[in-house]
Each structure stands twice: as C-alpha cells, then as structure tokens.
Image (spheres, rainbow, N blue to C red):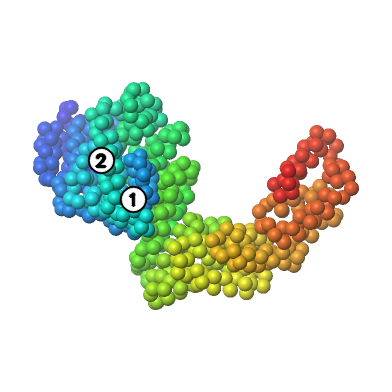
Amino acid sequence: MSAERASFEISVMKDGRWSTETITYAEGEARTIAKKFLVDRKCEGCKIVRNWLRGDGTMTETEIFCEVRAIKDDGPVRIAPIDAAPPKCEAPTDYFGNSSRNVMNRLFRAYLEKVFLTPTELIYSYKELKRIQDKDNLVSSAIDRVAQLQTQNGDQDSKSRREEIFKSIDQMSARARRIENLKLPKIAGRFSETIAKVRTLGTEEDDEYLALAVLSRDLMDVRNWVGKLERLCKLAIEDTDPHAIAMLDNVIADVLGANVVQEILGWQPSLGSAICTMIDLADGKMPTEKSDAGESAEILNRLFAERKLPVSRATILDRAHRQLRTPNALNRNETGKEHEEFKKVMLRLLGPSGFLLGAETAEALTTRQTRMVEQGGAAGRRAAIGNTFRAMPDRAYGVIYICELAGSELATEHAADMVEQLEAVYASRSIAELCERTLSPRDRMTRATNAHRAAVASPLPDDIKKKLADFIDGILEKYLIDEQIIEKLDHPDSHLRDRAVRLVQFCAAGVLPEGKAMTRARQRILGLLRQPSFDAHFVDGISDPARATKSLRDFHQLLVRAGFGG
C-alpha cells in the first residue's frame, strides 16, 4: 500500500536546466535509470525526487539523489575579442574589482558559459582557477590581449605588463589555495549573518574575502544562470545591511554578464525592443509577464526599482549600449522599419535632462547610424552625425547630443562636423523653434536650460561654448518678454506675499540658467524686496505671530535656494 503512495521522478540537466525524463514507482529502478543517464559523458547531472502522497491528499517532495558535474571537455575555447583597454590593476586586490571582473566576463565568456561559473566563483576557488589556467592557452591569450591594450599608448612595453599580470594571478591563486580546505560556514539566513560568522573564525584572511568565498561555494552548486540569479536576488531582497547588499550586487552583475539576460527579457520581436526592455529593466520598470526567468525576473526588477543594485544596473546599461553598436539589424523581420526602430531606441535613451549615459549614449547612437548610411569611413561618420542630430526630438536635444558627442573619441576627427550642426540651432528665432511645440511653458524653459547647461559643461572650445550658451540665454529672455511670464507671476492685484513667493519659486525651480533671463526675473524680485517695510507687508494678514515668523523664515530660505545669497 505504501509503495502505491510513492513515486520517483528522475530529472536530467541539460544546458544548465533540469527537465523531467521519466517517473517510476520503485526506488531501485529509479536509481538504476539515473546511473544509466550518468553513463553519458555529455550528461551534466541527474537527480531523483521522491514524491509521497499523504493521507490528506497532499504531496511531499524529497530529493534522495543528486549528482552534478562538468561535462567532458569537447575542444578548445578561445577568448572573446575586446577593443577597449580596461583600467590597469596595480595590486592583486584590484583584480577583484568590478571593472576587472567585467573584463573577465567578456574575455572568458565562451568558457564561463560552458562551466556555468561567474568571475567571482572563478577567482575565489583555487580548483577553478587552476582549471582555467590549464585550459589550452586561454589565460595567456587573455593576458596578452589586455597587456597589448594597456600599453598601446607607449608608457610601458607589453612584455613587462604581461609579467605584472601573471605575477598578480599567481598571488590570487596562492590566496585561494590557502583557504581551499578551510571549513567555512554555509549560508543560512541572511548574507549579512554569514559575514558576521566569518568574522569569528579568527583567521588572518579578510572577512569580505572569506564571505565571498562562502558565497562562491554556495553558487557553484547551482549549475544554471537563472538558478544563480534567483539565489542571489533572494539573498539581496531579504537583507537590510547595505554592505551585504553591495557585495551581492557585484555578483549579480557577474551573472548579468552572461547570456541569462535573454531569458530575463523573454521573447522580443526585435533587437530594438530588446534594447528598450533592457533599459526598462535597469529602471525597474520591465513587464515580467513575458520573462522566462520567472520569480528571478520579478525580484530583480524590484531590486532595480528600489535602486539597490547600482553595479548591476551599470552592467545592463553597458550591455544595451554594446548591442546598439553591433551591426545586427534593429528590426531583422521588417528591414524597412530600421529608422523607425532607431527612433524608438533613441527616445528611450533620452532622459528629462539629457542622454542616459552622456557621451557613451551619444557615441552609441552615432555608431548605429553609421550602419544605416550608404557612405563608409569618415564620410559615413559625418553623415551619421548629421542624421542623428536631425533625429532628435528638437534642436535643444540636438544641442545636448552635440555637446555630449564632443566628449567621445569621435571628436578627435569630427569636431568640425559636430560644430557645423549647431548652425541649425542658431537659425531658431524663438523657443518654439528650439524646443518641441507640444511642451508646456515650464517644460520648454527647462529643456532649453538643460541645453544651456550641456553647452557650458561641454568640452567644446570656449568661444563656441560661449556663443551657444549666450544664444540659448537670449532665446529664453525673449520668451520671458514675449509671453510676459514674469508679469503673469507678479500680478499687481495679488497679495505681496503671493507675488514674492511665486517669483522666488520660479527662480528656484531650475527652469532658467544663470544669465540674462535669470537676471530679468531677479530684478523683478529685488524691486519687491526693496519696498519700504517689506517684511511687515509680507506677513500682513497673518494674525498668529508664530505663523508669521515661520512664513517669513521659510521665504528667506527660499531666497537662498533661488540664488539671493545667505
């Protein structure tokens, strides 16, 4: 009778995912089947789950067997190409940093996908460090490439840099070997509790290093990316200690450097849609219904929304920008919609005050445009700059684009082409020609002011910056006069207190830059402040002395925020 209540589910792992293969009702038969699966050298793992039907009709599940292993080596693995020089790591501890692990993630992508390891798991495990060092010439090829990139400016020869990197890796291996057989606690509860436990071990090793070694050992038992992500996200969402969450953020960023992002996003109709969805995810606004990552995607989305994962957010945004630069079509199914798809991506990369990642976003959009023009080389880049400028929602955003692009490598050869686009800006006769007509008066002034700030902060030559900033300031001043903005705020029939507060709030709102327009607004305020007995007139009508004092104090604080001094 009890045998009829028990069943045994046999699952195998393929590409890091468990899938049920068969069900039997005898434990001995289940174990025999599992062993047969494991005979296949390509089988990544096998497990048996015993299902027990209780008397009340509910089912309990118990894992009675599980074996997971690395599949047999099936040929050489090569490093992935990188073109940008990563920052130099001067000390062995620098190699544990975010930028270094990001480079490892890209260089060793093919290898890490085969063994389902993050860079963190790799560098905190002596066994895995040894394994990758023994794998073909993978490590030496990566070191050669990094050394070459880091010495191409001629301040050091690549051979000596190569030797420095090898020495640091030897020191990292020695450190990992020292703790290889050290009995470390397992993660039970919050990760911050694990950090506290390793502090009590009394070893000479750094607490953070040991805590990440514990986390690495925990993750190495999970042989798929979604599983690792789920484990890390649950630890992050359940913890309240900022330091523990920051450490988890670094490792989540490692996982997001893998191909798991495709599963998180789910099916996307085009590359353009995938890029936009990545940005939605980074903002914590991604619809998770289509995700193939289940609960992991929901928790990750929530963590991003709560701004708890800045390093992981940077990883997702970097991936979105790299995808934008690729030669792959933004809309492979409908080639005629490539420009429409570009516009959709571009608008998603624009924020209220400018580009999502500044010069990096401007350069990525321009690179994508070079794929969409007929010309090649310098002529193609010149055409791409013009096309991207004209694709902006208005000329104010065009100013921001040029100012940001001036900070990219494209400025080395195309500075004159960038400045040439500004002629269209100077042709604007009013704010309606500089900013979108559908914007509210406040939003128009804010956008023009953001363009002014971009001009002032840009690496453009000083004379061009001044000309551009003065022009935008003039447009804003003209708008104040033509639309009588100040007069509408300072209606003479209103109480002095209301007039003064409205005007000062306007100056403090950030809708005007320092310049002629702001001076005009401040002069009106000064005219009110210089009236005889201003303070008495300001509190006139407020019968409660305490309330009158507070009202006056709040107004003076507002004056300071509006730039009227302390």
Disc 2 or 1, which lies upstream in sequence?
1
At x 44%, y 34%, the residue is: 243
Observer able to see residue 458: yes
Horizontally, residue 141 falls left or right of residue 309, namely: left
Observer able to see residue 390: no
At x 18%, y 33%, the residue is: 65
The spot of residue 252 in percent (x, y) is 37, 43
The spot of residue 157 in percent (x, y) is 31, 54
Quarter where residue 367 is shown: bottom left
At x 46%, y 35%, the residue is: 242
Q: Quick one: label 1, few (<14), some, or many (20+) residues within 10 Å? A: many
Q: Nearer the viewer, residue 294 or 485?
A: 485
Position of 549 relative to 72 (above/below): above
CA distance for labels 2 and 1: 18 Å
Q: Which residue is mark 2?
A: 170
Q: Quick one: label 2, few (<14), some, or many (20+) residues within 10 Å? A: few
Badge number at residue 56 = none
Say what amino acid the circle numbered 2 marks: Asp
Q: Which residue is mark 1?
A: 103
In this rendering, which labeled residue sits more in front, label 2 or label 1?
2
Horizontally, residue 418 falls left or right of residue 178, namely: right
Horizontally, residue 431 falls left or right of residue 174, namely: right
Say what amino acid the circle numbered 1 marks: Val
Instruction: For the C terminus, give its image quadrant.
Output: top right
Position of 156 relative to 402 (above/below): above
Mark 2 secondary-structure assignment: helix
- For the view shown, which residue lies furthest in the right direction? 532
Mark 1 secondary-structure assignment: helix
Q: Nearer the viewer, residue 68 or 373?
A: 373
At x 40%, y 41%, the residue is: 249
Q: Nearer the viewer, residue 153 or 67?
A: 153
